[in-house]
Image: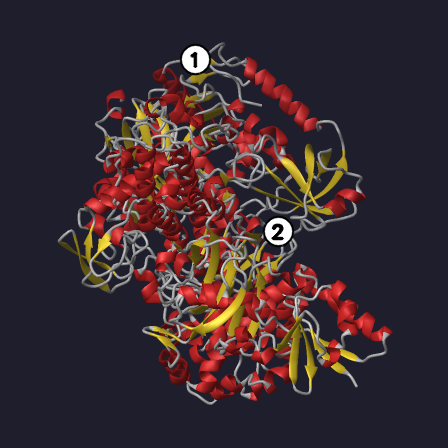
Amino acid sequence: MRGLANREPGPRQTMYSNKVIDHGTPARTAPATVSLQIDGVTVTVPVGTSVMRAAVEAGRKVPKLCATDSLEAFGSCRLCLVEIEGRRGYPASCTTPCEPGMKVKTQSKKLADLRRGVMELYISDHPLDCLTCPANGNCELQDMAGVVGLREVRYGYEGENHLVQAKDASNPYFTFDATKCIVCSRCVRACEEVQGTFALTVQGRGFDSKIASGPTNFLDSECVSCGACVQACPTATLMEKSIAEQGQPDRVVDTTCAYCGVGCSFRAEMKGNDVVRMVPHKDGKANHGHSCVKGRFAWGYATHPDRVKKPMIRSKITDPWREVTWDEAIAYAASEIRRIQGKYGVASVGGITSSRCTNEETYLVQKLVRAAFGNNNVDTCARVCHSPTGYGLKTTLGESAGTQDFDSVDDTDCVIVIGANPTDAHPVFASRMKRRLRGDTSRPGAGLIVIDPRRIDLVRTPHVEADFHLQLQPGTNVAVLNALAHVVVTEGLAKDDYVRERCDLGDFAKWKAFIALPKNSPEALEKVTGVPAASIRGAARLYATAKNGAIYYGLGVTEHSQGSTTVMGIANLAMVTGNIGRPGVGVNPLRGQNNVQGSCDMGSFPHELPGYRHVSDPAVRALFGTAWGVPIQDEPGLRIPNMFDAAIDGSFKALYVQGEDIAQSDPDTRHVQHALESLECLIVQDIFVNETAKYAHVFLPGSSFLEKDGTFTNAERRINRVRKVMPPLAGLGDWEATMALAKALGYPMHYDHPSQIMDEIARLTPTFTGVSYEKLDRLGSIQWPCNDKAPEGTPVMHEQEFVRGKGKFVITDYVATPERTSQRFPLILTTGRILSQYNVGAQTRRTQNTAWHAADVLEIHPHDAEQRGIQDGDAVSVVSRKGDTTLRAVLSERMQPGVVYTTFHHPESGANVVTTENSDWATNCPEYKVTAVQVVAHAKKSEWQREFDDFADRQESLLPKGALKGEAR
Amino acid sequence: MTVTVYVPRDSAALSMGANEVVEAIVQHATKSGQQVAIVRNGSRGMLWLEPFVEVVTPNGRIGYGPVGIADVPSLFEKGFLHGGDHPLRQGFVADLPWSKKQTRLTFARVGVTDPLSLADYEANGGLAGLRKALAMAPAAIVEEVVQSGLRGRGGAGFPAGIKWRTVLQTAASQKYVACNADEGDSGTFSDRMVMEGDPFLLLEGMVIAGLATGATEGYVYLRSEYPDAQVVFATAIERARAAGWIGADVLGSGRRFDVHLRIGAGAYICGEETAMLESLEGKRGMVRPKPPLPAIAGLWGKPTVINNVMTLASVPWILAHGGAAYAAHGVGRSKGTLPFQLAGNVTHGGLVEVPFGITLKELLYDFGGGTASGRPIRAVQVGGPLGAYLPPSRFDTPLDYEAFAAAGGLVGHGGVVVFDDTVDMRKQARYAMEFCAIESCGKCTPCRIGSTRGVEVIDRIAAGEKRDANVALLRDLCATLTHGSLCAMGGLTPMPVMSALQHWPEDFAR
């Protein structure tokens, strides 16, 4: 098996070269072209293309420093001057658009003199420490000095200069060394154009011009540490600390980020088996060369000392762990499963697949459960996030996925963001969206409607301001959507032709009659939602009358008792306004985890085989039964919450959990703990001893995304390749461990490489028929469906007709959540994420991202705080009918009075001790977003937190001495 | 009987105590029981005579100057309110040679009328051009301006009509007129004098530009160093809007053109047209690369007429009298008149509006009367701080764009600064580099670093350090600046430097 893990490197692995072709200015896409001559070479380019870019196309390079093809031309460095026949002077090639018949000379004596003259000025104010500079070997200034043939600096080095300045090392990941700055403004422009944060500026003018991140330093500034400035810097001014410490990389492997559902492509820059830098890939179709603080910098967890490198077993959770061989651990796990099934029945065991593992690994776990365990007791963490998306979109449109690609946002004219906080949770896509919202000189920005109880950043951020912020009461999404649709229908804004052609008219007629009822009017619902009727009407008109309207949503939609209803309400609204089936429109779930889409696609749900096909369908069962050589059960298995209940009941006794920390992430923590304690065999496969592992009997050390081949599927259905850049620290990739377990259970699987797993998926899944590693290598990525009808994938779904045939309007009655405020619990707690941490924090807490967020806090409106005598920074107790926990309070006007907010990135915060057992009526997705609570000043840890500390200490003491440290606390 | 007395409100007059003189006159008149009506006019441009007080007599306006408060009692004693004789009496203003020798088309009303009187403006020929324009098709207005040969008075000399035509022919939902009133060149003040002395003229020119090009909004970008102009012009905008001269319904025509005043923040570079656009948009004043031309994508990305105050102020006369009449003035391709501004070491400094073609010598001696110090003129800088220094051997050069360019200089905004033979031209060259270093926006490398290095190299030359090598380096640096800079700021800084080096090499050898 080890041999298998060490296959030849994939074709995307190349020897490292920093000479990635940079065209200098962005590509233009105009259909019309112009032809011109550059140094006698005729070249034809789209209208609007710069002379500089055309020169690269013609195989010529014009020297440059301030230009790079991720940014609009700026024209400041003056190295790229050229001669153009019939024109006076020496125009800058970056800012000069090509014109038909132009004759350009890129080299002449005069140009050489000018370029050398400019370079001589640069170097007269630059340190001469190239040999000891971290950018040595990868410095554009150095390269250009060579290119222009600078041989002396006649100004000397005694003049005025910037050579003595303190280095700003406040950011954990990069330094700002102003002594090396050439004031090309690439960082400033990257922060504006690419990231859209506008944190950087040029301070002073003339020779005194300096890049500034604010009054103090980078860490205390508005900077979000996305890395765009570091990426753009042509010198060592903005430099990764990892490069400064380790030197330039020697090889590079293309792979995919393992954080959020955006699925950014990265180049893992390596030295041997060590990552020295992760650089966003320019050709990545999800991110187009952009990144965020997590993917770009927070990868250090992968080699954190806490990583478990040896399998461990124990018979009781009060026993010390025993390090064993893989064979022993696997054999023990298999024997326990068989023993338990023998004693309690076939259905007494189950598995949970991971949204952080690859498609191939997820597929194997559900196959293991269905074929080797012999039941359908498989579920995945999508249960607690986007299961309503699957249900809602399948019901209305016919497919359990978002309708667009990310690029679609470029074509939109009005964006609705509901229950999502993209600038924190999907930052790279948020930057893209902000770019469209800002507009440019050719097009005004798109309209923006934010539907969120909190004033998220997007409501007002530099050069972006929402036209409408519908600041609703948590739990009233359906009411707001109904009110919006009511306005569309009753004000004659519905796209009747579209509906007539594409939707089921019977359902539509019923829905229309329902939605037009006075009870669904904005005025009638104002009391419920707290949103002024006039705002609802304005927002509905804006969205309905936009040429292209697009809806983006997140867990603020799904994690409610009416999560599925809300998703269907969104689909209704999009259909009635004709906003599905072309670029610029659509219904777009922003997926939380890197492979949550993929784990759902791969048959992780107890009722569905891969490709969302119900287990009750005999044809589907026959297909898989034949392929897998075992009969498939026709009854859906247990969902995660059912597993917990069954465990407490005593009918469910063993669970295999791959890469998912249910003890921290699932609601009603005490209930979950009780369930886990009731199991006779809990097998946890993870890279760290997470909260769940503290209740485990078998620990199988997992492999990070850097240690295996596979694929992730992002929120836009894009299948991206994950490539192994280093061997698994514990010897096996997760897919190999699952295979070993299957074999030990008497169900051997036969794959030499994950590509063969994908081949099997393609054979068995109509939407994946055309997918193969060969094609992924060739195309870079593929958006499913990919089959004979769409051999290169499907960026936009439902183009001609809906997948289900006719779009189905579903009646969406608003039903208030049972979770209500009362005298005892007068506030609503809602939960979410922040930029620097990811999910349960197991990864990001083991990186320096803790510089931004060292602990979860409770955000509370100053009015609510005042009433309770709470000051900013006070310890407060958050109490619900389920439990209580103690957090620090942060006073924030982002909250509306009556609503408090926290995150669950740190286990000891116990956010889920407070959340309730309420869940979506259709899918059991927990209602994380609405919990009635009281908040009181309270300096002591809660009882649960004290128990947590004790348990954590005890569990740490049971770990093998010296093998690893315990869970960071 | 009430006597009308004119005392300028022009900044030059104010700086010489005009307000105090008004106070003194009013006090004396009250004390002596005489009725005076004070009118605060613009300046006639005879700055050595400011405050230049005029009294209206049945036979014409008689001028006294320069009047200080100490002179007021004696003026009353001598009956100046009736034109009485006094050492400061300059005679009938209309007959003064300074005025008579000029061809005042643009400055016809400046100093004559009450700048803020709508009635005065209209009674003295105001609005004639606008009324004509309102009856014309936009293209016809543009053609009239093309025919006039009017070229941009800000310094670049680009034909205004051609620019307007581009804006007219660029389809857009919104177009703008942006008036550049960031008159930052040392020794220049004509923009200010019009804005303080005849502000409705500029407004009328802007409205005509709007009618000609389809622009409906105008912005005036005024430098913060002109607080008096700001007060006068802001008042003029209010009064013009109230009278319906500008706004939603220009003179009842149903056509819209409104004007907004914006104040700069003390950066010379914001007088560069694209940096001005950035500043108008609320951004850091940095030069934009061209293309796109502002005429196609200017203010907020929309087609924009950018003209200097003088250019726009020339337009009403052209429309009123016809492009051909304007083109009848001037020489070669330099048509019409230019208001020159005489400053520095000169006896009679001030504003002289004459047709193109006058020689520098005539300007310096016939109008200027030689140096104030009485010493010989050694150098003259024409066209602001980026203009060339010219020696007496070039004083026969006629002032027109082409002839001046051929002589290695530039007419620019028409500023003329005079130096006598005590001037050190190496120091002047150093000052040019220093000015660039202080005012550079810092965007392009040659200007950002080169200007500072220029100062250092000249200092080394002054210190006698490797003189020949450093002079050669200075020449190379100037070539880099000239051909490599993003805008005219860095591109023209070498002009004063190189002209000093060319004409006065001896100053660099000691």
B376 in relation to A278, above or below: below
A964 in relation to A884, above or below: above
Q: Which residue is mark 1?
A: A323
A458 in relation to A397, above or below: above
Percent across and percent down for residue A86 are 21, 61
Host chain of mark 2: A
Question: Mark 2 falls on what kind of element?
Answer: loop
Q: Which image quadrant: the C terminus of chain B?
A: top left
Question: Mark 1 falls on what kind of element?
Answer: strand
Q: Work out which residue is located at the far bottom of the displayed protein and give it.
A: B135
Residue B500, numbered label: none
Quadrant for residue A353, please give it. top left
- Mark positioned earlier in the residue sequence (2 or 1): 1
- Rate crowding at label 2 as few (under 14), some (14 to 19) or many (20 or more) other CA atoms within 10 Å: some
- Three-letter code, disc 1: Glu
- Three-letter code, disc 2: Arg
Percent across and percent down for residue A948 are 63, 24
The reply to whether residue A712 is visible in this rendering is: yes
Host chain of mark 1: A
Q: Which residue is mark 2?
A: A455
Q: Total marks drawn?
A: 2
Quadrant for residue B40, please give it. bottom right
